[in-house]
Amino acid sequence: MAKPRITFICQSCGAVSNRWAGKCDACGEWNTIVEEGPSGGGIGGGPGGLRSSRKGRPVALASLSGEIEDAPRIVSGIGELDRATGGGFVRGSALLVGGDPGIGKSTLLMQAAAALARNGHRVVYVSGEEAVAQVRLRAQRLGAASAPVELAAETNVEDILATLAEGKRPDLVILDSIQTLWTDLADSAPGTVTQVRASAQSVIRYAKSTGSAVVLVGHVTKEGQIAGPRVVEHMVDGVLYFEGEGGHHYRILRTVKNRFGPTDEIGVFEMSDGGLREVSNPSELFLGERHAKAPGAAVFAGMEGTRPVLVEIQALVAPSPLGTPRRAIVGWDGPRLSMVLAVLEAHCGVRFATNDVYLNVAGGYRISEPAADLAVAAALVSSLTGLALPADCVYFGEISLSGAVRPVAHAQQRLKEAEKLGFGQAVMPAGLEETSAAMVRRSFQPSTLADLVARIAGSRRGRPDDD
């Protein structure tokens, strides 16, 4: 009889090796490699022990052409959550929700569970971290105690699936969290790579076979990524990140993967004593505390999925007492800021070599698209010269290394959002088609970044007329 093979698995990235080592060669983490027995496999279609092979059976092949049916969805009634998921929870799908501890993941899912239960859907909430009494306390605080949500406090996957099989098939199952679950198919401790992977596979198999929508809650690492093996993110149908800064009262639900809808969508919520409240117009939230006369502030017209968002970018340029000036960025990409500073110095003659540069996106919002280059450059020049930018102007456009201003997508939606909030002019790339005529007449379309710098510096002459 062949000797069972022992493998060693990294608990950080899931890499498999045939010997133990102090450092993982794949991710570089120390002391994360753990020995796993032969029964710890379980992801390829059952337990990982020795099994007799069976003869495969042929499967039916289909063509690319044919009828296409829309995915059946369960609408929660929470507009921002339905927007992030692409229109609601899809039956038979698995959704992974991640976020920092205390950010509001359980609060959001409890509110969604209560809303669906009141509409006649069977909702099962399984908590692996809290007792039933603790979940009830949260429901009372949120005003959801009267909703017919079924609760359970269990961590064994087999017991959970046996419970769900009794009675009517549930429409939505919430498991909080995936790191606390364990299955009999694996011998390792809960939270390890093998347990998380095997437990997720069993739950996803249940969702696909029964048509129930399953939501998995995942912990995040100190880098902000969902903890556990990345293979779990590939196994599920959608991945949502619940983001927010500790000093701000709003939360953003961001879609990073969705097999049944668009990605890069966001849902905006405001945290209050009674739970999470939807924010239908996030631009007003991000611009609510804006100081129009302060230099170094520019309003960026951005896009998050299909939604335009206006947010204020703040810059502070101050003389540096250090030999190497400081560059501090909150809410934007650090290398991108270095590129914009280099273009301003090389092609516009604006010197930042002896100045500290601080850049902040107001409200703790995070920007990932390069269309913010023009707004960042305008804020930097405004802070350096001490000249406030026009209060009713928005900025968007990408800057190339040659100093040219390049066009960006969705200009029409950006300008419509700006008009709706009372902005009358825009600084944007030239050559954009299908833009709003009213905004175009009062817009400035620089072909190079030097044109924008010259316009800001030339506004000093008309500064007394602005008061």
Image (cartoon, grey):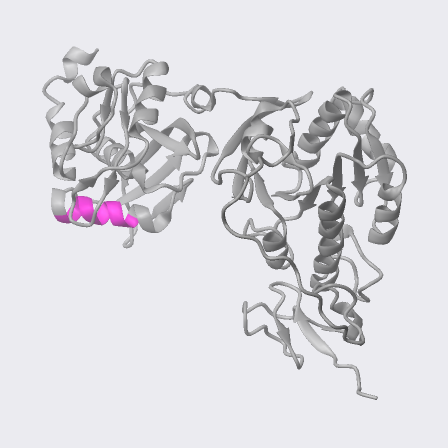
- The residue under the point 84% across, 88% down is 1
Residue placed most toward the observer, 165 or 239 = 165
Residue 45 visible in the snapshot? yes
**Range shown magenta:** 338-346
Q: Residue furthest bottom?
A: 1
Query: Is 381 left, or right, of 91 in this rendering?
Result: left
Query: Is 110 left, or right, of 431 in this rendering?
Result: right
Residue placed most toward the observer, 320 or 275 = 275
Residue placed most toward the observer, 44 or 355 = 44
Query: Residue 268 placed where, x, y %?
Result: 53, 28
Looking at the image, residue 358 lies above or below residue 294: below
Q: Quadrant of residue 243?
A: top right
- The residue under the point 26% across, 15% down is 424
Q: Quadrant of residue 102?
A: top right
- Magenta region's main secondary structure? helix
Looking at the image, residue 164 lies above or below residue 266: below
Residue placed most toward the observer, 391 or 419 = 419
- The residue under the point 63% across, 59% down is 229
Q: Residue 340 lies in magenta, yes or no?
A: yes
Residue 249 visible in the snapshot? no
Q: Quadrant of residue 435?
A: top left
Query: Residue 154 placed where, x, y %?
Result: 85, 46
Query: Residue 253 placed where, x, y %?
Result: 56, 35
Query: Residue 183 placed where, x, y %?
Result: 82, 58
